[in-house]
Amino acid sequence: MLRNILVICVLTVLGMCPIMAQTIKPAKKVLIRYATAHVGNGERIDNALFGFQGNEIILLADGNKSRVNVLDYDSIIDAEGKHIYPGFIVMDSRLGLVEIGAVRATHDYDETGDFTPNVRTLPAFNTESKVIATVKTNGVLMGQIAPSGGVLSGSSSCMHFDGENWQDAKVRADEGVYLNWPNGYRYKGWWAEPGEAKSNDKYAERRKEIVAFFEDARAYSLDSNQAEKNLRFESMRGLFNGKKRLYIRADWAKDIIDAVLFYRESGVKNMAIVGGAEAHLVTTELTENSVPVVIDRVHKLPSHLDDPLDQPFKLASQLVAAGVEVSFATSGDMEAMISRNLPFQVGTAVFHGLEYEKAIQAITLNPAKLMGIDSKYGTIESGKRATFFISEGDALDISTNNISTIFIEGNVVDLENHQIQLYEKFKN
Amino acid sequence: MSSENRLDSAMLVIQDGVVLEVSKSAKPPKNAVVHDCRGRIIYPSFIDLYSGLNVDGPKRDKSKTAKPNKASNWNPAIRPEDAMDLDFPLNEKKVDDWLASGFGVVNLHERDGIMRGSSTLINLGQENSNDAVIRAKAAQHYSFSKGSSKADYPSSHIGAIALIRQTLYDANWYSKLVEPKPEANLSLEAINGTTKVPHIVELNHSLSARNVQNISKEFNKPFIMVGAGKEYLVQDEIDPQTSFILPLNYPKALDVKDPYEARMVSLAELKHWEAAPFNAYFLSEKGNTVCFSRDTLKSSKVFLENLRRTISSGTVHNAALKALTETPAKMMGISSHYGTLNPGKTANFIIANSTIDNQDFQVLEHWTKGNRAFQSDLADRDMVGKYNLVVEKIDYTVSVKSISTKGIVATIERVGDTATVELKIERNEDLLSLLISEKATKSANAKLLYTLTGKVSFQGGVWDGRGQDGSGNWVQWAAIKDRKSTKKPKKAEEKADSLIIPMLINPNGAFGWDSLSDETTYVITNAVIWTAADTGIIDRGDIYVVDGKIKNIGKDILFPSEVKRINANGRHITPGIIDEHSHIGIRGGVNEWAQSSSAEVRIGDAVDPWNVNIYRQLAGGVTSAQLLHGSANPIGGQSALIKLKWGQSAEEMLIDDAPKFIKFALGENVKRSNRSTPGDRFPLTRMGVEQSIGDAFVRAQEYNPGTMQNGQPVRRDLDLDAIKEILNDERNISCHSYVQSEILMLMNLADSLGFRVNTFTHILEGYKVSDKMKTHGAMASTFSDWWAYKFEVNDAIPYNAAMLVKAGIVTAINSDDAEMGRRLNQEAAKTMKYGGLSEEEAIKLITINPARMLHLDDRTGSIEIGKDADLVMWSDNPLSVYSQAEKTFIEGRIYFDRRKQDEIQLEIQKERARLIQAMILDKSDSKKKPEHKEEKHMHCDTILEDYSEE
């Protein structure tokens, strides 16, 4: 009986939550209790005490082991049966850089030219994107916004999804540079017909160009104040002093190995492989060189006709089992829109062997580490930014992903979006 | 003499181009020129009915439409009236190479177009056309490729088939026209005038054999098929009476030394590499008649090498010979003069150094019509080897290394002497000249030792003659070949008795079956049964399946105790998933986009049962699918409704007596909005879409095939046939649509013209007009959550499906995508998240609802008594991401079993390893790097589609 009352209580509180939250002044202290907290670092706290003030998390503790004085808090939310997660982070995303796939006027991710490391996604990021509004309502609250064209595509930035302009949405500017490694195999024919691929006879040539560009950039970086500025090389400095990470898109085993060999010689301090369709075949090379992998997409077909049916589903668990650190993207067809399914793609990986909290870590702490923002983001530990959400149920499964409350940087997020508005308008 | 008849030490007498006598008689007739062919083999000349000689690429005009001044067919790919024009003399070098490969008679046609016109059968090696031509208009040639035609139509395999069918109907109609004919059409006249000659069709894919067979039945027209290489995989579906011309063109071994790169080669490719030379053997075993062709193989060397591979792959010497001589002669009806060496036949024969199964086989001479048309440059490859040369009692060792058109390369040594001696040999027919000299050294100038002249005799084994030394003294000389140094002719490696026939599976690649369980009677016990029917979800129950049909379901049902039980152990069973909108397993294009209505094309013609995505969807619990035409034009093509019976043929996958469906499309794809160059095909706006559909229906209303109009028979029109079926309520529409305006438009048009739109597919704004859909009686098949890929999906919302369900519309979730198609259970679950449907409602979206839409609900779609046992066993709640299909049953048979996947994968690994090893050990040269077949998975709604007419 007591329990029933409590549930009703909770429902009432949470039902009012969006309205109530708007009244929360930034400085107020909020306590959320009884929820299951998925910390983001691989741990779970079943009966958590979670507090934040303004944009900072001030408390995360096990309710079975610690006590708090509720009087210290301005607001208390009882969330029994619910789940708290750090905001999910999607890597290698085109969110905010494309609004409508077929309308070129809405595209800002593929600059012309092969070597354009200096082009930045940051000022092109459209915070007004209707697509983003449908992504955050599923728990994806931050993203690495990355360009995709050419060879050296440009610089990526980490953004959160609550700013009114890119400046306010910026979490970390220009944290990475994207490199499209040449494919050892290149497809012929046209896309709708089973086109053959042949070995890429331009591979060696392309590789040489990349090596030469990096050598020049590295030499340039040795002088901290070049008299004659080269914007492309300026944008590469961070790679050699460890302030930026090099993200190399590569899928085939041999290409990955070659990309790792290139990385070792290049003077670049930090690197990650993005894509990694055959990364499970080269885990030794990856772990020996501490190279993490950003899996481009879980929901995709196997790369080869003969591959196991579930190969893309189990890639993450294979890599984690081999000691490779993974995070996730949803790149490919309809990539921006599909990012709202990031939780379910990761859920699929969980079913195929990835341990649940490790999976959460792969879309929270791991990407935060890649982008160098883990001191403030990626977990819901005390001292970090209050960027998190509450789901009524398991956020990685479709029918239970029901997000009632979102905070980004301590600000409550409006759960409305274009689609919900249309739903409300037409549902009767 | 023939494939059955061989005479040893025989004599062949020819006169005036004709064989007079073949016998063992030792006495040549008087006045005869005698050629001693001791040790030689004489064969009848080979006959190539699909010769690639003279193929220099299409020479024809590349106009977009046929030339009206030729009174030909409207489509330039249809040119049956064309004859093969040959410019004599033919390129001598090329002809020689064909004669060197054994072919004396070739059938040549212009390899361009779908109906390519007639071929000319000629004797090679003749000076002029009067001597060469055996028969003009020897055969009519067909293909599925439009060649140089710049006309947009047809743009697909299905379009090519429709065009062939329409043209053959047209020819039939043309023959019935009452004089005076309203129009002249030389193409149709040519078709009607050449019905007696053989019809030869080049297969673009072995699966097209089925298409040819269907056309053959429809028009009562036998075809000889030119194989595409994998006919051995469709032999069970092909009438054993069918004759094949098999180009001996086999895949080469690939360079697969690198294990990473080897991954780019599929098991199907590896298996085909091994099995390809067995094609003739497999077909012959089934009773099909086969003949061989060099087709477009570049050199005689490659052809002869592949001929030997064929012989070592089950086709014995005599059968191969027959396939090169008697059979093609018979197919062309020229057996009375060609194909064997009996008296009275044309003296077409080759003189060879050995039999065709021999690795050193070489055509030394080729005679056609009694004339020596070809003589190997190197009259004698036997000349290569070591010789003991004696001049003035001094011994030399001569090594003839090679002979080519550039000359003879030879070295010489004086026995027991290190001084450097040089040799130059020239040979003209059987006369020889040799020049022996000492090379210049530091101390001495070059010194001429001998100039010798002489002759070759005893088949090159002995040279002898006279000559002069450096001082002008005459000398005698002789050289005898060291026979030990000549290589023994090697027989082709494998003999028929030790033949290892490659094992074939269905399909012949990854995940293929060697045998399929026939078990279709059992009880599945202890299952959570999602019936998708009124009974809802049965917590723990049994399903009794008899002969692939559901006999009973429920708790504690009765069944005979001896019936096999499959214990579900509390796992969930749902009906097999039905995908209302799929494009998997279609080959040669899903769109025939060139015309605004392509109602005449049939996706059923292009079903590719070997496509791995069929198996992948099975693994996702899909048992039935509607394979749809794309969305490039307002009226698309006819659908194929299939069950995913992996390992079976296309015909077996097609659902028996399936309701007829056709794809319509509206909006951006149809109006080509997202193409860089929209072109000028009407329509380019939604305004035009309405008119183009309306026009088609009005024409169909006025169309009455089988009647007379203005005193002439009405021409049968396959396009209008299909539209007429819609008006007659015999064919259902599945219409690609997005925005409310176009949905309303089509329903209004339908109401005014008297037809019904069965299904709106995609219909992402259906939620805005659900009341009107309900009034019209339309159903809805939609995506769960796709949007933002083009402008017209701006108001697409994931709540759509749930809202439509609540409005009382029969609603389905479809895939339109090979990847999503294997997770439709997850997609259905999204309607619980977006719009709050119950589990029971959600599962219906992918089972009974699409079954209702496809009018298959009397046999599948739910777990009810009497229906097909199309079932899926799930590891857990099927609407969760933490669940997957464990077993998929179609009509009771288990087509997918996840428990066996590890075992299957291991088999794939082993078989790959075996074949990769064989490829690495293969000695043939010029291995290419692996080519990776990227499977393109298509759906009609990606952005890409609009650039490629998907």
Image (spheres, rainbow, N blue to C red):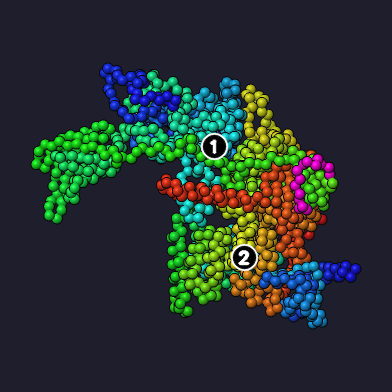
The numbered disc on residue B231 is 1
The numbered disc on residue B794 is none
Is there any visible trace of residue B537 in the rendered image? Answer: no
Residue B329, quarter of picture: top left
Residue B398, quarter of picture: top left
Say whether residue A336 is left or right of residue B30: right
Q: Is residue B129 above or below residue B494?
A: above
Residue at disc 1, secondary structure: helix
Residue, x 21% and y 45% (percent of image)? B412
The span picked out in magenta is B557-571
Mark 1 and mark 2 on one chain: no
Residue closest to the eye, B275 or B831: B275
Residue, x 78% and y 48% (percent of image)? B525
Q: Is residue B673 above or below residue B301?
A: below
Residue B562, quarter of picture: top right
Q: Residues within 10 Å of mark 2 (few under 14, many from 20)?
A: many
Q: Is residue B469 above or below residue A306?
A: above
Q: Find residue B117 and report its horizontal and vertical position in percent.
A: 49, 30
Say whether residue B416 is left or right of residue B171: left
Residue, x 53% and y 53% (percent of image)? B263
The numbered disc on residue A320 is 2
Q: Find residue B919 and report its horizontal and vertical position in percent.
A: 47, 48
Residue closest to the eye, A133 or B877: B877
Residue, x 59% and y 51% (percent of image)? B906
Q: Residues within 10 Å of mark 1 (few under 14, many from 20)?
A: many
Could you tell me the amino acid type at mark 2?
Answer: Val
Which is more foreground, mark 1 or mark 2? 2
Q: Find residue B861 and report its horizontal and vertical position in percent.
A: 75, 44
Could you tell me the amino acid type at mark 1?
Answer: Glu
Residue at disc 2, secondary structure: helix
How far apart marks 1 and 2 lie (CA) works out to: 46 Å
**Pointer 2 indicates a residue of which chain?**
A
